[in-house]
Image (tube, grey):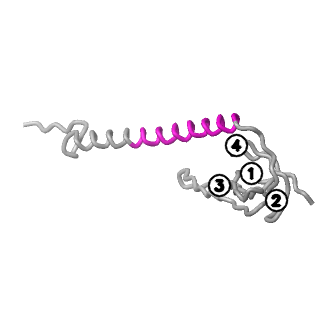
């Protein structure tokens, strides 16, 4: 009598590989869904900002924060470290409302807590801040 070891080998039939394929495709589609969701959300935010008027209001820099992300990439025996920083500034306008806006590193470095001036923005998009001395 001859024993046949098919593609499933000694794993007890096709159940192991069938389950693996299901999990693989499930994870693949979840990751693809997250990427598409993020892309569509970004397009919607960009479109929303474009439809908003450009406003200039008196404001005070209330606080600043930086979000640093560190990444380690593995390439065989080599590790590559990288980081990225996203900068945010919270402004308080005359009505007392506060808004946190994403700014670039140059703007972040030039703004100080307590600065007073004219904030120009469009929706959630920071455009500029002119300090009043």
The residues bearing labels 3 and 2 have C-alpha atoms spaced at a distance of: 26 Å
- Left or right side of 50 for 26: left
Is residue 31 magenta-colored?
A: yes
Residue denoted by label 4: 123
Of residue 21 and residue 66, the one placed in the foreground of this image is: 66
Specify which label sits upstream in the sequence, 3 or 1. Answer: 3
Q: Position of residue 120 (x, y in %)?
A: 80, 46
Q: Which residue is mark 3?
A: 82
Residues at circles 3 and 4 in contact by the CB criterion of under 8 Å: no
Q: In which quadrant is the N terminus drawn? A: top left
The residue carrying pointer 1 sits among few (fewer than 14), some (14 to 19) or many (20 or more) residues within 10 Å by Cα, namely some
The residue to which callout 1 is attached is 103
Asked if labels 2 and 1 touch by Cβ distance under 8 angstroms, the answer is: yes
What x and y, as percent, mark residue 70? 61, 58
Residues tagged 3 and 2 counted as in contact (Cβ below 8 A): no
Q: Residue at x 25, y 44 (%)?
A: 16
Whole-angstrom CA distance, mark 3 to mark 4, is 31 Å
On screen, residue 76 above or below 25: below
Q: CA distance from mark 1 to mark 2?
A: 10 Å
Q: Earlier in the sequence, mark 1 or mark 2?
A: 1
> What is the magenta range?
27-51
- The quadrant of the rendering that contains the C terminus is bottom right
Among the two numbered marks 1 and 4 on one chain, the one whose residue lies closer to the N terminus: 1
Q: Nearer the viewer, residue 63 or 4?
A: 63
> Is residue 12 within the magenta segment?
no
Q: Nearer the viewer, mark 3 or mark 2?
A: 2
């Amino acid at each position: 009598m001859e024993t046949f070891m098919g593609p499933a080998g000694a794993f007890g039939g096709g159940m192991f590989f069938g389950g693996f394929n299901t999990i693989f495709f499930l994870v693949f589609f979840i990751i693809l869904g997250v990427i598409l969701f993020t892309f569509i959300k970004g397009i919607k935010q960009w479109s929303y900002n474009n439809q908003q008027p450009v406003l200039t209001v008196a404001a005070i820099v209330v606080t600043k924060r930086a979000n640093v992300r560190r990444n380690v990439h593995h390439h065989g025996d080599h590790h590559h470290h990288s980081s990225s920083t996203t900068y945010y500034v919270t402004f308080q306008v005359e009505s007392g409302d506060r808004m946190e806006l994403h700014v670039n590193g140059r703007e972040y470095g030039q703004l100080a807590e307590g600065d007073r001036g004219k904030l120009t923005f469009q929706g959630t998009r920071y455009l500029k801040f002119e300090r009043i001395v």
